[in-house]
Image (cartoon, rainbow, N blue to C red):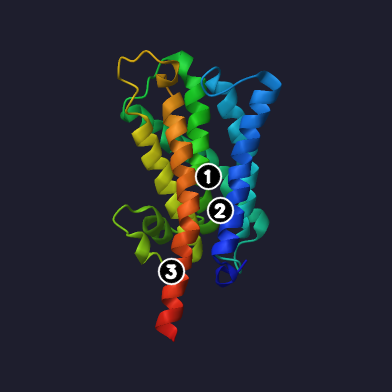
Amino acid sequence: MLTAQIGATTALTLHSLCAAGLAAGHWLAQSFYSSSLITDPTRTLRFLTVCEAPIVIVLFSWLRRDHDRCTFIKSLGRGLIGLPIGALFNAFGAIVLGAPVGLKYWPATIYWSMLMSLFTFVPAACVFGASKLDWQHILSYSNSFYRLSNVVDYMISVPAHGAILGAWLGAWPMPLDWERPWQEWPICVTYGAIAGHLIGMLLSPVLIYLHQRHIRTKVE
């Protein structure tokens, strides 16, 4: 799809479908296994990942940038390949920043990393492929959101930054001695990442609207 045809309403609709995937994963875990992030984080994360992955990969493959050289199927393949690669990066980053490495934590860490990959890595993999310049532009913290040049850039960058910031903030209660079950890895980090990602998805259409309004004002 041509990005020129995408407006704030379309972006909000696509983000809503992604949010619906998370809601569906939570509902399935709760309905069939009475699981939640607190009672069974591994199973719940597995449901969230399984429900969210096809939605994210399909939608962002539809938004791929290089339509002339990349088919929809090829973009799907880029998303499928990007999922485990992004998970490795997220798992490595979490461990470096203090995530536990015991064997009992690995299943939850793997599924958390895959969910974070869907929030941060997979959308860009579907849209940009291996374009180094686009990756640097979209994920650089030095780039102001107001300097992004494309509607899809906002749809990728804002929720991704929201998920990363949310996960970082969500990790703060972990070392405190409150002795609450939700302080265990990766429960509070997941809650923070999902909250940040959802906030980013709400903010993204607003920034897209302001961006397109600014362009129209300059043209006039």
Provide the secondary structure element on which disc 1 rests.
helix
Return the x and y of residue 10 as percentages of the image width and height.
Answer: 60, 62
The residue that label 3 is drawn on is: 211
Q: Please state, as top left, top right, bottom left or bottom right, where the C terminus lies in the image.
A: bottom left
Q: Which mark is residue 82?
A: 1
Return the x and y of residue 67 as percentages of the image width and height.
Answer: 60, 66
Q: Residues within 10 Å of mark 1 (few under 14, many from 20)?
A: many
Q: Amino acid at mark 1?
A: Gly
Cα gap from disc 2 to disc 1, whole angstroms: 8 Å
Q: Nearer the viewer, residue 61 or 202?
A: 202
The disc, 2 or 3, on the residue closer to the chain's N-terminal end is 2
In the image, residue 219 above or below residue 42: below
The residue that label 2 is drawn on is: 126
The disc, 2 or 1, on the residue closer to the chain's N-terminal end is 1
In the image, residue 103 above or below residue 51: above
Let me know if residue 34 appears in the view. yes
Q: Residues within 10 Å of mark 3 (few under 14, many from 20)?
A: many
Cα gap from disc 3 to disc 1, whole angstroms: 29 Å
In the image, residue 156 above or below residue 36: below
**Is 94 left, or right, of 209 in this rendering?**
left
Return the x and y of residue 186 as percentages of the image width and height.
Answer: 44, 25
Q: Nearer the viewer, residue 202 or 46?
A: 202
